Image (cartoon, rainbow, N blue to C red):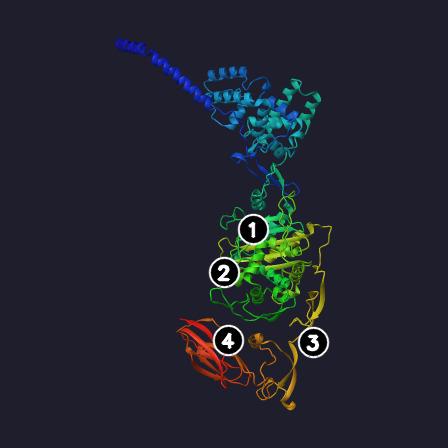
């Protein structure tokens, strides 16, 4: 053992310099690393933002740094009560030291060493700022670190800046930081208005924020006890007088209730959070009205509950006050926390097929362009349209029925597909798409085959908010109203979407309950006891149900559907979305401008004139028209021609066809009949209507016998048919029909160069389908006249 000791002593003697040098170097390196690890900057914090409704009621709060609330900026001058109570609690000698209270440190060091653990921290406000900016475990090493940083912070920034930083980031319980947010949260007032008791109460919270929650019984009692102690200490030191102490200890704390975030406003808060103005403010008053929000939510969810058994999973709705465009209610889904039906999706910003909800804009553009009036006659009969890819589009009405001749007002009111498609084909799809994009629809696709004529039935997907934006133009004489989200948001001009006359006339049509007959019976959800323009929409396969409605003061858009585009069971816009919109109007109309009675009619264009017309043709009624209706026209567009549909027709009793001038009067009878154009003939026959014949009696024709023409009516060129080998040949046929002049001529039907039939009036035949591509012609039997060939395809 002695030998080892001697060897060690010898080694240390020989290496003393190296050992001492190593110790010195380690100390220097450690010191450098320690000082480099210190941060003498006052770290900024991102503040939270509070959203209030239009009347100042709490909607929600968007967290700031570390998902905490608060960090709100302080006023330029700190109130005396806040400074005095805070320093009395945290650091009485704050303005007397340089960041470290050395006497307190000595006392705390003795207590900590004596107990071998941290008993007293002797933390000054600068040291607390250091800890709040860089939280560390409560150890002696961490305390040294905080003391050094506190010293540096004070030397660099001064006492005033350090105190302001502390009051900005100190914890006041319930994830709230900073005394400004704490005063707003607990007392609903700015820090300048705090009483002595309230200031002392807040000053107590940062010491134990988790154990002094104002909204728990025990926490509140601890905070009150600490506040009284602070006030008594201030009185003992002569900072406050007897009267101030008495008032403080006997006054009501006036603690605010815990603000509850309305569950029905979750989507509204999230939507508004993406539009927080960058103006330095932290409290934002929105245009939402909590009362209207709750009523809208209840109307939507009540309606959805009645549709659950029909496969409806979710709903959404938005309410806009007119004419200013303020968003008063914003319900993005039925339940934000419903995972099964994806309630977390904001369906007001989700693109879906609007069904027929865009039809009013198609008709409005037709009215604007000229050539169409509210009394324009539009055929609701079978029709075929060629597609951009060379195919054939054969549309249907939703009811799979046809109503024959309709006036534009009734075609829009009844939401018929065929008339809308005819108008759209005249306008051009691209022109309508461009106009809708101009009105606020985003993500428009201009590929040639992106939408086609099915645009009229919802192939252009929109969000409910975009639809609401479009409908503001109909409610505002053709100019869109930008949707406003904040009370102090500057008013911005809209865009001219339609001319004034077209917009006003379209709104008048949408509010006309009689124009909706027979598709929508009286007493349904589309009928109101005040002037409300309404349009519904149903997407293909009943995947979406929509309703858009507006009055002189409100615009409401509602939607019902499923997140996964699942079909619903017959849930149409009229049956599903319209009842919700109607309920919203019933609940809210009396709450919006209650001093003003609701309008009972929509205004017409200033230059409009009322004219009596035949309700079938839209022309001036003649002596044979059985009914008359009043229609409104922009001056200069009213009809001048008499009705051609009701006429006295001369009939050859021998043939039942038109009697020409050479027919003996003894075989001629004059009847008042429907003289419909040829486009209605197949429809009229299916309806078993007695209509005037279009062909001349071969016994006494009225046409010029030298004029000879033949034209194929059916089938249309480019038609495609499916050949089923299991179907008997006599049932697997296609109808061939031709228009012939003179009607007395026979025609020969020729398929692929082979005659298959020779027929007289009405020049119809049937041909048995065979797979392949076929060319069909009709040839007058008595001459060379032949029709233009048509080509059809039969797929096997």
- Which of the two discs, 2 and 4, labels the residue nearer the N terminus? 2
Q: Which residue is mark 1?
A: 348
- Residue displayed at 71% across by 65% down: 635
Could you tell me which secondary element the residue under label 4 belongs to? strand
Residue 92 appears in the rendering: no
- Badge 4: few (under 14), some or many (20 or more) residues near its Cα, within 10 Å? some
The CA distance from mark 1 to mark 3 is 51 Å
Side of 187 relative to 463 (left or right): right
Percent of width and height locating residue 66: 51, 34
- Which of the two discs, 1 and 2, labels the residue nearer the N terminus? 1
- Residue displayed at 52% across by 26% down: 41
Residue at the limit of the structure toward the left, as seen here: 3
The residue closer to the viewer here, 660 or 245, is: 660
Q: Which residue is mark 3?
A: 622
Q: Which residue is mark 4?
A: 714
Check the picture and name the quadrant holding the N terminus: top left
Task: Identify whether 494 is placed above or below 407.
Answer: above
Task: Identify whether 216 is placed above or below 789.
Answer: above
Check the picture and name the quadrant holding the C terminus: bottom left
Question: Mark 2 or mark 4: which is in front?
Answer: 2
Q: Which residue is mark 2?
A: 448
């Amino acid at each position: 053992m002695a030998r080892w000791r001697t060897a060690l002593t010898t080694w240390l003697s020989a290496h003393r310099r190296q050992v001492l040098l190593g110790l010195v170097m380690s100390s220097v390196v450690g010191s450098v690393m320690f000082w480099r690890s210190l941060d003498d900057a006052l770290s900024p914090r991102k503040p939270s933002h509070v959203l209030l409704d239009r009347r100042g009621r709490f909607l929600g709060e968007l967290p700031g740094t570390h998902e905490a609330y608060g960090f709100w900026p302080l006023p330029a001058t700190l109130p005396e009560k806040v400074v005095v109570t805070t320093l009395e609690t945290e650091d009485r000698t704050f303005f007397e030291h340089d960041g470290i209270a050395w006497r307190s440190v000595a006392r705390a060091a003795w207590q900590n060493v004596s107990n071998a653990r941290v008993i007293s921290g002797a933390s000054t406000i600068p040291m607390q700022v250091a800890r709040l900016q860089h939280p560390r475990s409560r150890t002696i090493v961490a305390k040294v670190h905080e003391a050094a940083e506190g010293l540096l912070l004070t030397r660099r920034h001064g006492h005033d800046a350090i105190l302001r930083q502390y009051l900005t980031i100190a914890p006041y319980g319930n994830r709230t930081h900073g005394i400004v947010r704490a005063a707003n949260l607990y007392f609903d007032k700015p820090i300048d208005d705090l009483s002595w008791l309230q200031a002392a109460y807040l000053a107590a919270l940062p010491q134990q924020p988790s154990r002094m929650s104002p909204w728990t019984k025990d926490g509140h009692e601890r905070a009150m006890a600490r506040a009284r102690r602070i006030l008594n200490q201030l009185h003992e030191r002569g900072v406050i007088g007897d009267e101030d102490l008495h008032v403080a200890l006997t006054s009501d704390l006036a603690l605010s209730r815990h603000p509850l975030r309305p569950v029905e406003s979750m989507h509204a808060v999230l939507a508004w959070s993406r539009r927080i103005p960058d103006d330095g403010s932290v409290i934002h008053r929105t245009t939402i009205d909590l009362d209207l929000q709750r009523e809208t939510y209840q109307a939507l969810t009540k309606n959805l509950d009645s549709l659950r058994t029909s496969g409806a999973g979710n709903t959404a709705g938005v309410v806009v006050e007119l004419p200013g465009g303020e968003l008063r209610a914003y319900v993005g889904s039925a339940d934000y926390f419903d995972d099964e039906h994806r309630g977390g999706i904001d369906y007001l910003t989700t693109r879906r097929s609007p069904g027929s909800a865009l039809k009013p804009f198609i008709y409005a553009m037709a009215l604007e362009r000229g050539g169409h009036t509210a009394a324009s006659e539009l055929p609701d009969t079978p029709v075929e349209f060629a597609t951009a890819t060379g195919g054939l589009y054969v549309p249907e009405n939703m009811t799979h029925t046809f109503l024959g001749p309709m006036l534009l007002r009734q075609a829009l009111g009844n939401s018929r597909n065929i008339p809308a498609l005819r108008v759209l084909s005249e306008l051009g799809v691209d022109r309508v798409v461009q106009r809708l994009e101009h009105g606020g629809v985003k993500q428009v696709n201009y590929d040639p085959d992106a939408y086609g004529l099915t645009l009229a039935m919802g192939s252009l997907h929109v969000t409910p908010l975009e639809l609401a934006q479009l409908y503001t133009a109909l409610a505002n004489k053709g100019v869109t109203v930008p949707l406003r989200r904040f009370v102090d948001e500057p008013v911005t001009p809209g865009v001219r979407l339609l001319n004034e006359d077209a917009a006003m006339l379209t709104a008048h049509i949408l509010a006309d309950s009689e124009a909706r007959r027979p598709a929508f019976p009286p007493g349904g959800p589309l009928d109101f006891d005040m002037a409300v323009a309404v349009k519904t929409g149903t997407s293909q396969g009943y995947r979406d149900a929509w309703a858009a409605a507006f009055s002189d003061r409100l615009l409401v858009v509602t939607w019902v559907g499923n997140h996964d585009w699942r079909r619903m069971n017959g849930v149409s816009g009229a049956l599903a979305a319209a009842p919700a919109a109607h309920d919203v109007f019933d609940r809210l109309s009396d709450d919006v401008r209650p001093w003003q009675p609701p309008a009972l009619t929509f205004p017409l264009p200033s230059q409009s004139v009322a004219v009596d017309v035949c309700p079938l043709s839209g022309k001036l009624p003649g002596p044979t028209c059985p009914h008359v209706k009043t229609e409104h026209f922009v001056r200069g567009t009213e009809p001048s021609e008499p009705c051609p549909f009701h006429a006295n027709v001369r009939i050859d009793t021998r043939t039942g066809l038109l009697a020409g001038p050479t027919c003996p009067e003894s075989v001629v009878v004059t009847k008042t009949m429907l003289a419909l154009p040829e486009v209605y003939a197949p429809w009229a026959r299916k309806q078993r209507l007695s209509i005037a014949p279009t062909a001349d009696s071969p016994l006494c024709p009225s046409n010029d016998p030298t004029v000879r023409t033949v034209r194929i009516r059916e089938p249309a060129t480019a038609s495609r048919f499916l050949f089923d080998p299991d179907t008997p040949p006599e049932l697997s046929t296609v109808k061939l029909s031709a228009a012939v002049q003179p009607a007395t001529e026979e025609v020969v039907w020729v398929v692929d160069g082979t005659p298959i039939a020779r027929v007289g009036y009405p020049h119809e035949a049937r041909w048995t389908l065979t797979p392949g591509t076929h060319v069909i012609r009709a040839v007058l039997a008595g001459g060379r006249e032949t029709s233009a060939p048509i080509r059809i395809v039969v797929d096997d």
